[in-house]
Amino acid sequence: ATPTALMVGTGRGAQLGILLKGPEVLESTRRVDTIVLDKTGTVTSGDMSVSTVTVAGGQDESQVLAWAAAVEAGSEHPIGRAVIAAGRDHVTEKARDFVSTQGAGVAATVGDKRVQVLSPGKVTVPLPGDLADAVSTAESGGATAVVVLVGDVNDAASEPVAVGVIAVADRIKPSSAEAIAEFRRLGLTPKLLTGDNEGAARAVAAEVGIDDVTAGVSPQRKLEVIAELQAQGHVVAMVGDGINDAAALAQADLGLAMGTGTDVAMAASDLTVVSGDLRVVADAIRLARRTLGTIK
Ligand code: ADP
Ligand code: MG
């Protein structure tokens, strides 16, 4: 490939709304045969909002939302933003000692309570029946449920108690199904890879035309899934937007970040799609093939 032809490709890329780390990225773009997509913020808008709040017996809904929103104030995650929007007006006390565990949830101290907002899969204490029901109802409907747990900071020996379940949902981007059909036309096999629950993942995958789904994975596991595909001989593109995608984006032969996502994801990627529209990813692959096809 001549540098001039590659620079043309890069310039066209900028016009399409693609930022390349360097012209050599075009070469890996051309060879890709598998495209792995994160769900939240990549296939879906990532603009989540709270759909239902279910509280355990004796708990107050405003209080549960206030605890959760105070804790999520430290989070950049779409779930956190949804919880903040719903609970902000109830918050009276700032949280301290915030901790975020990627792919699991968040925790912080609010007053004399240690509050956690966690993925149901990471909850180790038993859930009362109505909260367990709220989780399965949310997940089978394609939503994401998080559990709010509260413990006493002054009593390290006490177990935290589940006080509520918050269901959040977001919308599939209108362009996603078309983009995935376009990937197939380009000969790429699409795969959905998400930290979210199986129910939500399957619902989204069915709607956009993806058959291959891996759900409930940690950021480290996302990286391993990419490495396993590579070990099978595939050249893998990964598209993501979150901090939780960074390791997988770096592992992929071609890492693509949504410009609407986190800086960490963009830093770990070879290519950034400024608009967050997945159809532009297909454009980028077509452009790379055409540009390099004319050089030789
Ligand atoms: P995705 O791959 O869909 O972007 P993540 O890996 O970011 O998902 O998150 C996986 C799961 O971890 C979420 O579905 C949620 O249960 C939990 N989680 C992550 N961040 C938060 C947060 N800020 N608050 C509550 N739960 C969270
Ligand atoms: Mg994401």
Image (cartoon, helix red, strand yellow):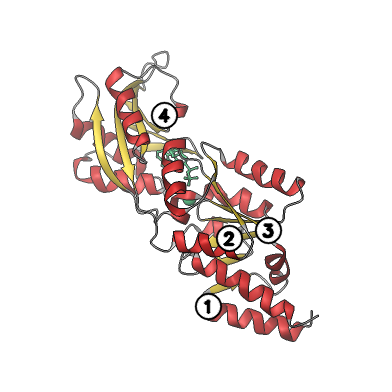
Task: Name the residue rendered at 47%, 56% in the picture.
Answer: 42
Q: Please, what is the three-letter code of the amino acid marked with disc 2?
A: Arg
Q: Please, what is the three-letter code of the amino acid marked with disc 3?
A: Asp
Distance in Å between CA atoms under marks 4 and 2:
34 Å
Where 205 falls versus 258 (above or below)?
Answer: above
Residue named by callout 3: 33
Q: Please, what is the three-letter code of the amino acid marked with disc 1?
A: Leu
Which numbered marker is on residue 120? 4
> How many other residues sit within 10 Å of disc 1, few (<14), some (14-19) or many (≥20)?
some
Q: Are marks 3 and 4 in contact (CB under 8 Å)?
A: no
Sequence-first tag of 3 and 1: 1
Q: Are marks 3 and 1 in contact (CB under 8 Å)?
A: no
Left or right relative to 61: residue 10? right
Residue named by callout 2: 184
Distance in Å between CA atoms under marks 4 and 1:
40 Å
Sequence-first tag of 2 and 1: 1
Secondary structure at badge 4 equals helix
Where 253 falls versus 105 (above or below)?
Answer: below
- Nearer the camera: disc 4 or disc 1: 1
Which numbered marker is on residue 83? none
Residue named by callout 1: 16
Where residue 92 sits in the image (x, y, percent)?
A: 21, 39
Secondary structure at badge 2 equals helix
Where 107 falls versus 39 (above or below)?
Answer: above
Res 61 quadrant in image = top left
Task: Name the residue rendered at 33%, 35% in the picture.
Answer: 138
Task: Name the residue rendered at 39%, 59% in the picture.
Answer: 173
Give the camera-side residue of 187 and 84: 187
Give the camera-side residue of 188 and 157: 188
Where residue 244 sits in the image (x, y, percent)?
A: 53, 46
Q: Please, what is the three-letter code of the amino acid marked with disc 4?
A: Pro
Give the camera-side residue of 190 and 94: 190
